[in-house]
Image: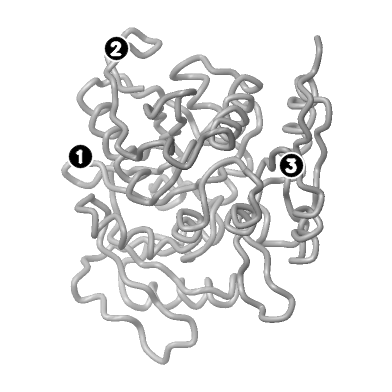
Amino acid sequence: MVKIRQRIEIVSSTTPGLSSMSVRSREATREALSKYYDDVRITIINTLSDLDELVLRRPDLVFSGMSFVFDETTQQKVWVSGHLDAHGITCTGSGQPAHDLERNKHLAKQVVINSGLRTSPFVVITRGASQLADTSQLTYPLFVKPTNSGGGTGIDEKSIVHNSQELRSKAESIERNHRTDALAEQYLPGREFSVAVLRRENSDKYSVMPIELVAPIDKDGNRVLDQATKRSNEEQIVELVDPVLRAAVCEHALAVFHALGARDYGRIDIRLDANGIPNFLEANLIPSLIAGYGSFPKACLLNINLDYEPMLLRIIDLALERKQATANQHISPNSFLEIVPSLSGTPGPV
C-alpha cells in the first residue's frame, strides 16, 4: 500500500496534568496511523518553547492529545489548539473556547444552563475559603469532584456526601490532593451514559453513539465511576436499545456538544435524574483512544461497527477537511440527528 505523503505529529506531554493522552494511547495512535501516512511522529510538549518549535516545523497536521501548556514567563495557560490556529496549523478536535470549557466543569455547566439545557444544580467550593459556599438551594446528597480534572481524578466512594461535614471533608481532600476548587452538584441517582459524538465526513451531520456505563457496587451500595474503575477498565458496557430513551440521551448530548462549541469529535457524559430525564455531567473533547479501552472507541464499535483504525482515520480526515475548507465554507453548528437502526435492530439516533 502506498502511504499518504503527510507529516502528522501526535502531540502529548510528560508533565503531570497537561496531557489527556497516555503513553499507551499515543504509541497506539502512532502505530495505527503509520500504516497509512509516511511520516507520523510523537512530539512531547512540556513548555511553550516546545510548542513554538512545533510551529516552526509546520507539520501538515497535529493530532492533539493535550489542551494547554503554561507560559514559563507569565505562568498563564497557552491553549494548544488556539496557538496552532493562530499560526495556520490545523489540529484535530475542538478549538480553544471549547477546551477552556471542558477543563472548567463549572463553566461548562453554566453554559449548558444558559443554553436552556439540563444539568444538575451546583456550587463551586473555592479552595482556601474560610467557609463553604451556600448550598441552601441544593438538596443532599451531593456529588463532589474537582472542577478541572478528567478521567475520574478525585472521584472515589466519598464523592457522594450527605451533609455539610462530609462536603467540607471531601472539598478539603480535593484541595489538598489536587490543588483545585471543588464542584458540588445535586446527585443524580439514575443510569449513566457516555455518548461519543463524531462528525460524518463531508457533512454537518453527526453520529451520536451512546453506551450505558455500569460501575461495580461499592461498600455503600453506590455505583461510582471513580478513577480506579476507569483505569482498570472494570465498568460494564451496555447497549442502549430503548428507542425513546436513546433518542432523548442522544439529542441532549448533541445539543450540549454544540452549546460548548465543540467540533468534529468528543464525548459527552449524561446521567438520568430521579425522573429519568437526561442531564449533562461533563465533556471530554480529547477522549481516550485505545482499542478496547475508554468509552469513545467502545461506543463507536458498539453503535456503528467503527473499529479502532477507521475511527482514527476519520478523526484525521475531519481535520484535513477543515484545513482545505475556505473561510465561507465552515461547518455549520446547526447539525441534526437522523433516526436509523442501531446494530441490534432497535431504532436509535446515530
Separation of marks 2 and 3 at Cα, in angstroms:
38 Å
Which of label 2 and label 3 is nearer to you?
Answer: 3
Which residue corresponds to the image point at 30% horizontal and 62% vertical from the top-left?
110
Separation of marks 1 and 2 at Cα, in angstroms:
20 Å
Q: Earlier in the sequence, mark 1 or mark 3?
A: 3
Q: Nearer the viewer, residue 58 or 271?
A: 58
Tell me: residue 241, above or below residue 176. above
Is 343 displayed left or right of 11 in the figure?
A: left
Give the amino acid type for the residue marked by disc 1 in the picture: Gly
Tell me: residue 71, above or below residue 315. below
Which quarter of the rendered picture does the N terminus lie within? top right
Labelled disc at residue 346: 2
Separation of marks 1 and 3 at Cα, in angstroms:
40 Å
Q: Which of marks 1 and 2 is nearer the N terminus?
A: 1
Give the amino acid type for the residue marked by disc 2 in the picture: Thr
Task: Tell me where residue 113 sits by quadrant.
Answer: bottom left
* Residue that carries the numbered disc 1 in the rendered image: 276
Q: Where is residue 59 in the image (x, y as percent from the top left)?
A: 76, 42
Is 186 displayed left or right of 98 in the figure?
A: left
Q: Is any part of residue 234 visible from this angle?
A: no
Which residue corresponds to the image point at 37% horizontal and 88% vertical from the top-left?
131
Q: Give neighbour class at mark 1: few <14, some 14-19, many 20+ (Cα, 10 Å).
A: few
Q: Where is residue 332 in the image (x, y as percent from the top left)?
A: 36, 37
Which of label 1 and label 3 is nearer to you?
Answer: 3
**Answer yes or no: do the residues labelled 1 and 3 have beta carbons within 8 Å?**
no
